[in-house]
Image (tube, rainbow, N blue to C red):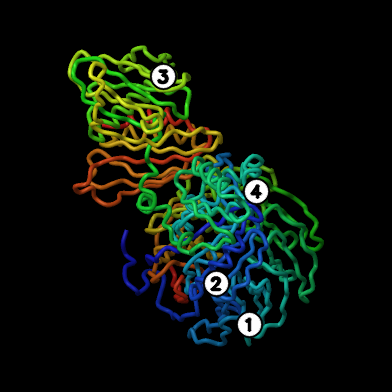
Amino acid sequence: MSGVNTDSPKGVLRTGWSAVVGDYAIACGWTCQGSLLVVGDAAGGVYGFEATSGGLRWAFPQIHETGLLALAIHPEKSQFATAGQDGRVLIWDAEDGQVRQELELGSGWVEHVAWSPDGRYLAASISRRVHVFDADGQQAWSSDQHPSTVSAVVWAGSQELATACYGRVSFFSASTGKLIQKLEWQGSLVSMVLSPDGNVVACGSQDNSVHFWRRSSGQDSQMSGYPGKPTALSFDGTGTLLATGGGETVTVWSFRGDGPEGTSPGVLDFHLQPITQLSFAQAGRRLASGGRDGAVVVWALEADGQGKVTGGALLGNVVAGLAWRPDERALAALDASGRVTVWRVGGQ
Amino acid sequence: MQTNEKVPVTILTGFLGSGKTTLLNRILSEEHGKRIAVIENEYGEVGIDQALVINADEEIFEMSNGCICCTVRGDLIRVLGNLMKRRDKFDYVLVETTGLADPGPVAQTFFMDDEIRGEFKLDGIVTLVDAAHIEQQLGRSDESTEQIAFADVLVLNKTDLVGSDGLDSLEARLREMNRMARVVRSEKAEIPVDTVLNLSAFDLDQVLERRPTFLEPEYPFEWTGVYALEPGRYELSLAEGPDPEMSLVITVEQGSDDATLREGAELCVRGYAETPESIVPGADIPLGKHVSLQLQTPGRKSFFLEVDAPMQVGLYAQHTAEEFDMKLLDAAEGSELPVEAERIWVAQHEHDDEVGSFAIERPGDVDPDRLNAWLSKLLREHGMDIFRMKGFLSIAGESSRFVFQGVHMLFDGQADKPWGDAPRLNQLVFIGRNLDEQGITGGFDACLV
């Protein structure tokens, strides 16, 4: 296919602004009611950009020594958290870019950080443990050692925290840290998403498959045959569609009826190199995909997972992050060269 | 989208106390100016400023299919995956494993994971051996055996603690287990850094340049002498020597050039596999048969052979002529016959260890379909026991060499430089446990066009 072959965006994507950060851009998110875009880079820098102009509000080029690994936006307040190879979690005030709290988790990499949906707790994983902090930055609890390094941390509503590691997904009580449920499967789980109702747990695995469980019935299934490992996963806002990477095509499983078992997935074919990023907008089954080829594509999907391209743009480098602004009228993309690109998003 | 130069990675293995940390510090101090990342699985005393040292627990990830060959090191995927994002990329990565690490999953990580393979290249596996303790370790643990079998370079360290005879026999034993590796000796890991870094050991050309004879096959005989005979009776005269008996096969119509000597050698290997006929002094030696000359009596001994037509014969003897002052004389005149051609062979050694290595070298082309079928079957059935494999092939109809390498069941190959005027041939090296050399060699021979 063709259609996205120049620097100017096509279809629903309209030119917005772009900026650069100091190194490979690792993660981003919108805060302050969508008025600020926060970006973290591989050199450990954290930057705040004005949403509409792209102007730099504040910048801290190397705050996490040797590198930043994760960034999470607070669901309500104008706060966010960053984590890095320095073993620290920093809690920031987004308005002025000041660090409000500094949590020392030990010597090791803090690879994952996540706020509970109600904003009461912050979870952070270092090596084989996950630590949970309350709103005052006090440690609420920490887990026992997992069997291997924690590879994903996701909240299941505000009552439960899910972690993934080699061979296991664990559910902990948000308030007490008590282990509630263990889902086991021999495989290296490299990514995890939960359906919005928390019932479906989907993990990408090193052996080029997606494994998922339904917590209500205990039933599990494996979707294999991917050419690569599915590191990018995204559920749509209704929990009907699960978009998965793991190759040059986006594979979309539909949970309508008895699916996805026994059904054919939607196959979205555009990218020339493997998918690195997937992000559903909350409304309207609109999916953004990014790949190693530097392309960002916006898809309009049907309930069966099939879809068509409605817009796209070409970055100069591997797509390293995608984030819809909360009003879904803008889409931010990061790339491996450290470029931050924001497009305005029109109607379909 | 960018085609970056892949970052080389060296794996340092060896038992606790073998000197890994000493070598590591030595590399870091000599390679100052380079950006080196060190991934350590045990806390060492690495204290060089410019190096980024990352401690990571060894995490072995097996797959749900249960295949050990798909087993990878999760810690390396994670750490390398993050390191490769930095714009000021590292010039080099050193991975120091624990003494108990199985090198298989470490090496497999660089084949199995597409993202790692896209950014890094495995430069070589360096195994440090504590010369004073390795003999005990080899008897006790599979890990030390496998660390030796996987190595591209074996650093025989702490040689000051062992006598030179002991070192020679140890080196011979290690070579037997791994014919691909280069062996270097050191006292306190004091070796030139370029013997362990930038080896391109997974590039076959380098191996061939380093040790051009490593593919020399082993034979059960050490010496061949070719003589031109007229019809008549001849006397083979031997003085006392190092062995009370000596095996011998005499080939007929034997050519003098190297190729026909090798052909004769292959024939004699089959002859040597037969039970020898004992020949006492004074008796006649049958042509083309495996015989055992009985040499127990003191002084010079004579055996006889008869030829009824003019021809060249080849004496493929278990020992060299020099060791027994062996001569072939005209029985009637007593005059000594000149040797038309002579050849010394690499003698076979006893294979004590389960882990060993062998090489196949064959001129000509292979049929790609037959080769594929054979190799798939071999790796499927014996991939667990084949630790490493590398070589190059002459594929029928292709103008370039095909170079390949493998770790267990994983196989990776590509077209290399064109053959041009060079003679087309195939060279393969296998290292593994209880490998069936004859079976594998026979299987490969059946793939030849």
Above or below for B435 versus A275: above
In the image, what residue occupies the spot 65% across and 76% down? Answer: A80
| Amino acid at the residue labelled 3 | Leu
Q: Please name the residue that numbered disc 2 is placed on.
A: B29
Give how far across and how far down residue B233 sits, in percent. Answer: 25, 15
SS state under label 4: loop
Co-location on one chain, circles 1 and 3: no
Q: Please name the residue that numbered disc 1 is placed on.
A: A94
C-alpha separation, residue under disc 3 versus residue under disc 2:
61 Å
Report how many numbered discs are placed on residues in the image: 4
In the image, what residue occupies the spot 44% across and 26% down? Answer: B240
Where on the picture, by quarter, is residue A178?
A: bottom right
Nearer the N terminus, badge 2 or badge 4? 2
Q: Residues within 10 Å of mark 2 (few under 14, many from 20)?
A: some
SS state under label 1: loop
Where on the picture, by quarter, is residue B117?
A: bottom left
Task: Using the image, tell me which numbered label, if any, was put on residue B133.
Answer: 4
Co-location on one chain, circles 1 and 4: no
**Mark 2 chain:** B
Q: Judge depth for marks 1 and 3 and give the one in front.
A: 3
Task: Using the image, tell me which numbered label, if any, was put on residue B414.
Answer: none
Q: Please name the residue that numbered disc 3 is placed on.
A: B293
Q: Report the side of A39 relative to B361 (left or right).
A: right
Q: Are marks 3 and 4 in contact (CB under 8 Å)?
A: no
